[in-house]
Image (spheres, rainbow, N blue to C red):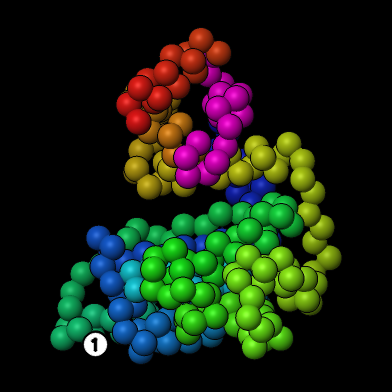
Amino acid sequence: MINISREARKINKAPFLHAIVQGINKENIFKEERYKNQYLKLLKEECEKYNIKIVAYCIMDNHAHFLLYVTQFEDLSKAMHGVNTVYAKYYNYMNDGRKGYVFRDRYVSEPIDSKKYLINCIKYIHMNPVKAGIVKHCREYKFSSYNLYNKKLLNKELSEDEIFSKSDYKDIIENINTVYVFKDTEENLESKIKQSISEFIEKEQINLFKVLSNRDILIKLIRFLKNVKKIKYVQIRENLGITRGTMEALTKIIRENK
């Protein structure tokens, strides 16, 4: 069974965090440049206040991604709360006194527990506007940190894959003031799975007992862990404490209902 209460302590071991904010009902809360600029300005102010480093970012129209380096996990909660509260007031004011929530729930964050995962996360963040079909190349998108990483490569005719292979973000990462050393261990995988389960529980607004006692919800969780988080079935089974027979029955249902 999962001991969710241990998660907070484990998060503190991974000071690199991928944070995501999204507009309520997928509303385009960053639809204009002034909104993107304002949110980024507020984020920089709060991060400076709490000594949080912005490693990478990309602000889209209805959501935003940030890779942050924190020394205290609690500081991230304070910073994000401050940013979102002030921005919500600004957004409502700028939209003729709009009332109500601006963000979908609270922000979501995921710890980065290996150097490979860190590099892939930065790449994923910068590729958002390309995957959305807004631009053909990362360098064309104004509201991301991509060009800060690749100034020396901007004038060269390289594909995005070539740029990522030639510029592995080493300089930026090594310049971060930290002695943190990544360790690719089973504990890291366990931490990733538990954080992913916590994210699912928070998103669905249910408790772990209900997940494990309701077949349909459990199947939904397994799909989320497998398809979104790219976790293998055997790892899901072991971490959820599901028997081999039960897992085989559930995965059969999942495959038949794709």
Task: Answer whether residue 228 is magenta in the image.
Answer: yes
Please give the name of the residue rendered at 42% of the width and 87% of the height, measured from the top-left corner: 37
Image quadrant of residue 36? bottom left
Tag count: 1
- What secondary structure prevails in the magenta region? helix
Residue 140 placement (x, y as % from top left): 49, 82
Quick check: 127 left or right of 172?
Answer: left
Is residue 50 shown to the viewer in this render? no
Is residue 150 shown to the viewer in this render? yes
Task: Answer whether residue 99 is magenta in the image.
Answer: no
Q: Residues within 10 Å of mark 1 (few under 14, many from 20)?
A: few
| Closest to the observer, 54 or 129 | 129
- Return the residue found at the far top: 245
Residue 96 placement (x, y as % from top left): 16, 86
Please give the name of the residue rendered at 60% of the width and 82% of the height, measured from the top-left corner: 147
Residue type at numbered disc 1: Met
- The image shows residue 153, relative to residue 162, as above or below, that is below
- The image shows residue 229, relative to residue 47, as above or below, that is above
Residue beneath disc 1: 94
Residue 99 placement (x, y as % from top left): 18, 74
- The image shows residue 205, relative to residue 110, as above or below, that is above
Magenta residues?
226-243
- Return the residue found at the far front: 157
Image quadrant of residue 154? bottom right
Please give the name of the residue rendered at 38% of the width and 73% of the height, measured from the top-left corner: 134
| Closest to the observer, 87 or 49 | 87
Residue 230 placement (x, y as % from top left): 55, 41
- The image shows residue 164, relative to residue 230, as above or below, that is below
Report the quarter where the C terminus lies: top left
